[in-house]
Amino acid sequence: MREKDLVKLEFFRILELLREYVHSKATERYLQEVRPIKDPGLLLKEMNLVEDFIPVSDRVNLYAFDDIEELIKKTAIQDYVLSVEECLAILKVIKLIRELRKYIGDAVSQWQSLSQLTKSLYLFGSLESVIEAHIDPRGFVKDSASEELRRIRQAIRDTEKEILKRLEALFSRPDADKVFSDKFVAYKNGRYVLPVKTSEVKKIIGVVHGTSSSGFTTYVEPQSVMELNNRLAVLREDEDQEVRRVLKRLTHLVGESHKRLLEAFRTLVKIDYLYAVSRLAKAYGGKFPKMGKRVDLRGAKHPLLSFLKEDVVPVDIVVDRGLLLTGPNTGGKTVALKTLGLCSLLFQCAIPIPIDEGELPFFENIFVDIGDEQSLQQNLSTFSAHMSNIGEFLPYVKDNTLVLLDELGSGTDPVEGSALGIALLEYLKGKRAFVFANTHHTPIKVYALSSDYYTPASVLFDKESLNPLYKIVYNSVGESMALTVAQRCGIPQEVIQMAKENLPEGFEG
């Protein structure tokens, strides 16, 4: 399906709503690829999965997790070494997978389609235990990760203890208050140093490692601890090398399971997506229509409006093959057309739609002509924009295509526009397409009244309040009510009267 048709029907705004419910950048990335499913068999399978997941979604305890897909792939690279933070991200995902397997696994006996999820939620108990044994949750490799690391860190602690002992002893000098700007041990450039008053720096034999921003203090490494600081630096390098060896071993263990871990992670992302779909469906009372041979949506609401507003009036939309909707502007014609279009798109993405019940065909394509298609940017008139858009998709119309035409025949001379509109409807009839069109043109309305393919229908409108009632009456045509709307909007009565006098004989305004 064309991206611009998805945009016109506000499909991507629904994906943005789903984005609010997901727990990972990985699922946001998954959402960017969601499009109508092209295979009816696969669609039915996905619908069954969603229907079975919705009652389980309340017991699924999801929480934020990192996008580790690329990270998992990197563990298969020979020289790649995971960082501590990356190990913890993988550990978090492994734990979440284990928890979800239990939550969903308990429900498989009741909802069989969930088994396709649990079968790839592999358990990584051994890997989980090894990472936990080597990595502290606070973000460092544990001393117990290896005997060598334990020995090195003990040597570091002993060396630091001796350095601090020697440095703190200098604060007991008789002239300490005069020499030192403060009595604390500082750490500069990987060395333990003392804060010495710059004016007294010659009284401490050692190496200068910088001064304070005010210049009042100079940081000096006394000669008495230079050898110990050197030893400490070597031990720090030994520690880094041993930590890297530990992390390399962990990377190798993850790499050995990377294919199964990648599959399990993608299933986790799918579950997060299903959770978002379930939340959205519950938010607007969504359910699936059955897949059939006609459009018959009862109590349908526009999904976006239904989510954002509580007082959306439901509408029944029935299209055997063709429907021509008539009636005044602001009467709800375009909303009804968009409701069918967006509901059809969501249905074919296996996303429940806000209806009481219904039936929808499987559409290979959904083509839309609404608005002026950026005509100003393209230097096209409204009519030219309509024709360019329609001309682009007409060659691809088939019997399993849904075509949505807003304001058919508008934007040009009404006589020519009507003639062209009728010709388009005849062409689409010849292709056996599903068509939902609306119009103000009387000749097109008359054509629908005598058609064996198109059902004429009108939207109800309260003439007193000028408010749309958002109800469709089938096998009828509606007035455009241009004069009534104009009068209620403040056009002077004398202008309205002149307009009525200019109407053709027998035409009521």
Image (cartoon, rainbow, N blue to C red):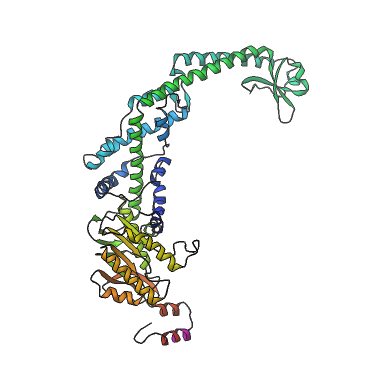
44 relative to 441, above or below: above
State whether residue 176 appears in this view: yes
Q: Position of residue 24 (x, y in %)?
A: 41, 40
Query: Magenta: predominant secondary structure element?
Result: helix
Residue at 46 percent across and 85 percent down: it is: 493
- Tell me if 158 is positioned left or right of 171 in this view: left
- Tell me if 109 is positioned left or right of 33 in this view: left
| Residue 481 quadrant | bottom left
- Tell me if 169 is positioned left or right of 361 in this view: right
58 relative to 318, above or below: above
Which residue of the protein is positioned furthest toward the front in this rendering? Answer: 395
Residue at 43 percent across and 41 percent down: it is: 25
| Residue 215 quadrant | top right
In the rendered image, which quarter contains the C terminus? bottom left
Q: Position of residue 334 (x, y in %)?
A: 37, 66
| Residue 437 quadrant | bottom left
State whether residue 310 appears in this view: no
Front-lying residue, 180 or 251: 251
256 relative to 359, above or below: above
Q: Position of residue 3 (x, y in %)?
A: 39, 54
In the rendered image, which quarter contains the N terminus? bottom left
Q: Magenta stretch?
A: 492-497
Asked if the stretch drawn in magenta spans residue 496, the answer is yes
Which residue of the protein is positioned furthest toward the right in this rendering? Answer: 199
Asked if the stretch drawn in magenta spans residue 317, the answer is no
Q: Position of residue 326 (x, y in %)?
A: 33, 72
Front-lying residue, 373 or 132: 373
Front-lying residue, 28 or 447: 447
